[in-house]
Image (cartoon, rainbow, N blue to C red):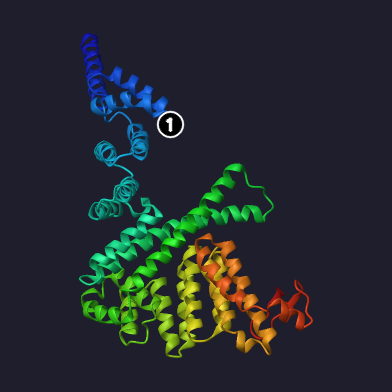
Amino acid sequence: MKTKNTILTIGMILFLGITFSINAQDKYGSDPNKCKTNLSIFYEYAKVGNYTPAYEPWNWCMENCPASSKNLYKYGIKMAEDKYDKSSSKAEKAKFAIEINKIYEQRIKYFPENLGKVYSDWANFLFKRAVQEEIVQKEQIYDKLGKSFKADPTGMSVKNLGKYFQAFTEHHKDTNPQLVFDTYDEIIEAVSTKMDNYSKELDVLHAKEASGQTLSAKDDRKKHAREVNLKALGQVEGLLDNTLSEVATCERLIPLYKQNFEKNKTDVKWMRRAVSRLNQKGCTDDALYPKMVEAYVNAAPSSDAFVFYAGILMGKNRTNEAIDYFNKAISLESDKYKKAKYYYRAALIYKKRGAKGKAREYARKALRERPSMGSAYLLISNLYASSANTCGTDEFSKRMVYVAAADKARQAKAADPGITSTANKYIKSYMASAPSKKLVFTEGKASGSAYKIGCWIGETVRIP
């Protein structure tokens, strides 16, 4: 029995040894020692940007053990692009371009992960090549951006998300606008997910600071990175909206949704997106809109659907029922960020109905749930600016309302880096209507002193 166990043990050791040898050969090629040596030499040179001595060991590894390390591709791309950029002739650039494309191909073959970023980076190189060598790369770039989007839109660079959607819209806006809308929704959902995650992290860091804690160096770097990312993503949202605005008009949307409503009225995703788009574009006066909202409520009696339905009830002057549905939507939701979105949507409905005080009330409720919701501050800012003529009794008091509006836009910018660009436009516009130094002097006021704005606004601001 002992002899039998010994034989089994030896057999298992031999089997494991053979398996390990096969796996090592798969990864390091037929000469694993040389592969490891060359890989180490290449890495030590490449990581400090010393590409000349790094090239030969790198090239050997690419030919003999391409699956040995992702560093072959991470630094190989940097090395090849460095040579490409330093090349003085188109012929040399073309040679290194072939090598760069091969590196990307092998990276995808041997390490098929994080492909959203990989294809996005590849598209960046193709775009650079098109500029530097003055060659047409449109289809190749579009192909790589499409593969990047399909693999993982959250891995795409901010600019490439915009480029892809612009090209996609141009390709399909006349032949298949629904496909354009679907793609827009997918991109916006990816962008919104990223922005929400960054905002949540920023909210935690802001809360730390507000409690008197000093941020660590690591937290400070994280805060800066999240602010930069949110600014960039906010710019993408603006670019996408501008691109879509040419296609998503009420004149296009209403006939399209009328045509597709019956076959999609039980498709929750389609209904949610369609109702949301009609609402965002202001296409709510057509009889189709309430019909679609009611179908959405029947298909998915959820918080999201109840908020839209409350808006319909408000339009029918069934205010008490509408408030019940708003409250029902909020009570069903536990996520603070989603609650904030529902409060914000309610604020927009009140704003459209001219109930400015109620609109501000719900915007403030949104901010209590999500202090970094810059769009809620901007909504209040816009409400104030639209009240300048009714909340002021003379030129000076009317112009001071714009100061209050600009202050809210500044709060939006401070709370939410994602809306920096929009907030800056608001601030510039409103401060252009603020009292001039001459008017302040004429009124006998002192710059920097407090000034109380009456009417429904009731805020104290500083005279500019």
Regarding mark 1 in the picture, which secondary structure is present there?
loop
Q: Is residue 334 visible?
A: no
Residue 314: give x, y in percent of width and height.
45, 86
Regarding residue 225, the answer to whether it shows in the image is yes
Q: Is residue 308 above or below residue 144?
A: below
Tell me the quarter of the image containing the N terminus: top left
Q: Residues within 10 Å of mark 1 (few under 14, many from 20)?
A: some
Residue 302: image quadrant is: bottom left
Residue position for label 1: 49
Amino acid type, label 1: Gly
Q: Position of residue 323 (x, y in %)?
A: 49, 81
**Please, is residue 21 above or below residue 231 in the view?**
above
| Nearest the eye: 95 or 51 | 95
Number of marks in picture: 1
Q: Which percent across, then down, holds residue 230? A: 49, 57
Q: Seen in the image, is 130 located left or right of residue 239? A: left
Horizontal arrangement in the rendering, residue 390 relative to residue 66 (left or right): right
Q: In the rendered image, which quarter is residue 78 located in?
A: top left
Asked if 91 appears above or below 148 in the picture, the reply is above
Left or right: 408 as drawn, with respect to 26 = right
Q: Residue lying farthest top?
A: 3
| Residue plotted at (61% across, 88% down) | 389
At x 48%, y 83%, the residue is: 352
